[in-house]
Image (cartoon, rainbow, N blue to C red):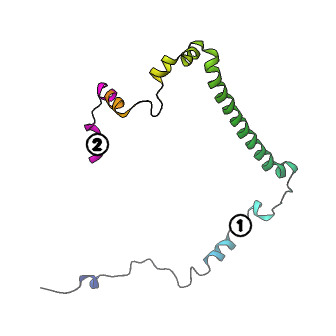
Amino acid sequence: MNNENILEKLNHKDGMTVPDGYFEDFASRMAASLPEAEWEKETKVLPRSFWDKVRPYIYLAAMFAGVWCMMSLVDVFKASSTDSLFDNNQLLAQAMNDDSYMLDYYVTEGSMSDSDLLDDLYESGFDPSTLIASNNQ
């Protein structure tokens, strides 16, 4: 078997060469060869007007005014929705004053025993094995 390295036989020069020191001062030579544009010659700094100075503070005040308006609107809608619910609906107000309605539909903590709760769940078709199977996975 021949153990010669065939890469040594190839010509490693690809013909892409650059003269020595070509890129050392390339940027300065390129800048010198380009013509100067009109906008580069002279720059004027305009003084800030009154509006330019005040604009950030006006925008900040407008932002806080908007937040205040949104909060007040939420408060108005929240307060009116719960108060007007009973004022405009006499049937609901009568039902809330009726003790039988409250006992049938309003359940507080401790008013229903655990066995009553489980009986109601079983009657409605609740299967506790589905909870056990889903917890094991």
Q: Residue at x 81, y 62 (%)?
A: 43
Q: Which amino acid type is marked by label 2?
A: Ser
Left or right: residue 12 compared with residue 84: left
What secondary structure is found at the residue carrying circle 2?
helix
Farthest-out residue, top: 91
Q: Disc 1 marks which residue?
A: 35
Q: Disc 2 marks which residue?
A: 134
The answer to which image quadrant residue 25 occupies is bottom right
The mark nearer the N terminus, 1 or 2, is 1
Q: Which amino acid type is marked by label 1?
A: Pro
Q: Residue at x 76, y 47 (%)?
A: 60
Horizontal and vertical percent for residue 24? Answer: 59, 81
CB contact under 8 Å: marks 1 and 2: no
Give the dominant element type of the magenta stretch: helix, strand or loop: helix
Horizontal and vertical percent for residue 7? Answer: 27, 82
Q: Residue at x 66, y 25 (%)?
A: 80
Question: What is the span of residues highlighted in magenta in the rendered image?
Answer: 120-137
Q: 26 above or below 101?
A: below
Q: 16 above or below 5?
A: above
Front-most of residues 107 and 124:
107
Q: 38 above or below 6?
A: above
Left or right: residue 49 compared with residue 69: right
Task: Characterize the local packing of mark 2: few (<14), some (14-19) or many (20 or more) Cα atoms within 10 angstroms.
Answer: few
- Measure the C-alpha gap from mark 1 to mark 2: 76 Å
What secondary structure is found at the residue carrying circle 1?
loop
Please say whether residue 73 is one of the residues in the magenta stretch.
no
Please say whether residue 136 is one of the residues in the magenta stretch.
yes
Q: Residue at x 57, y 14 (%)?
A: 94
Between disc 1 and disc 2, the foreground one is 2
